[in-house]
Image (cartoon, helix red, strand yellow):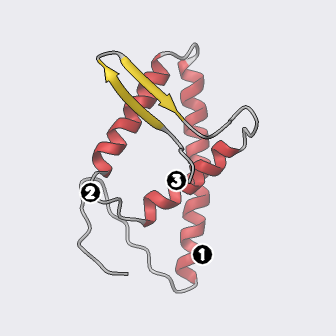
Amino acid sequence: MKKILEVLQYGEFDFRFNTDIDVSRRPEIISDIASKLSFCMATKLWGGNEQSVLAVIRALAIADLSLCVNRKSMLRELARSSEMLARVFQEAKREFEKQGGKVLTFGPEITPGKIKS
């Protein structure tokens, strides 16, 4: 098991971050993690707290962007990277459907019913 990201709050402004990932040694791991996260987020029921988890992830992104020296450049890079990943993901979804698989898409604020695999 790897700790991808742990964020703990000990006091009003005392946040501590931890990860087992060493980006300085393996920079390519970020795109690998992003694609695995995308797949996981699209295929699993998270257990009911996904709305809160996504809100915190977005809060981290907003905080990071607020500190960027060149925020517009970072936003362009995030848009480019996420668009590229979305294309790959959509192509994989189309291929899965061609092979007879079924894909159900749930929009924001829609909770899927209880199903058994």
Q: Which residue matches tag 3?
A: 37
Q: Which residue matches tag 2?
A: 48
How busy is the neighbourhood of tag 3: few (under 14 within 10 Å), some, or many (20 plus)?
Answer: few
- Considering only order in the chain, which callout, 2 or 3, is on the residue closer to the N terminus? 3
Q: Answer whether labels 3 and 2 touch (C-beta < 8 Å).
A: no
Q: Is residue 42 left or right of residue 50?
A: right
Which dot, 2 or 1, sits closer to the camera? 2
Instruction: Check residue 95 in the rendering and tell me which mark sits there, or answer none.
Output: 1
Which dot, 1 or 3, sits closer to the camera? 3
Quadrant where the N terminus sits is bottom right
Q: Is residue 59 above or below residue 95?
A: above
Q: CA distance from mark 2 to mark 1?
A: 29 Å
Mark 1 residue element: helix
Q: Is residue 42 above or below residue 57?
A: below
- Could you tell me which residue is drawn at 61 percent across and 33 percent down? 77
Which image quadrant for residue 21?
top right
Q: CA distance from mark 1 to mark 3?
A: 19 Å
Instruction: Check residue 15 in the rendering and tell me which mark sits there, or answer none.
Output: none
Q: Is residue 13 above or below residue 62?
A: above
Q: Percent position (x, y) of residue 37? A: 52, 53
How busy is the neighbourhood of tag 2: few (under 14 within 10 Å), some, or many (20 plus)?
Answer: few
- Considering only order in the chain, which callout, 1 or 2, is on the residue closer to the N terminus? 2
Q: Specify the amino acid type for callout 3.
A: Leu
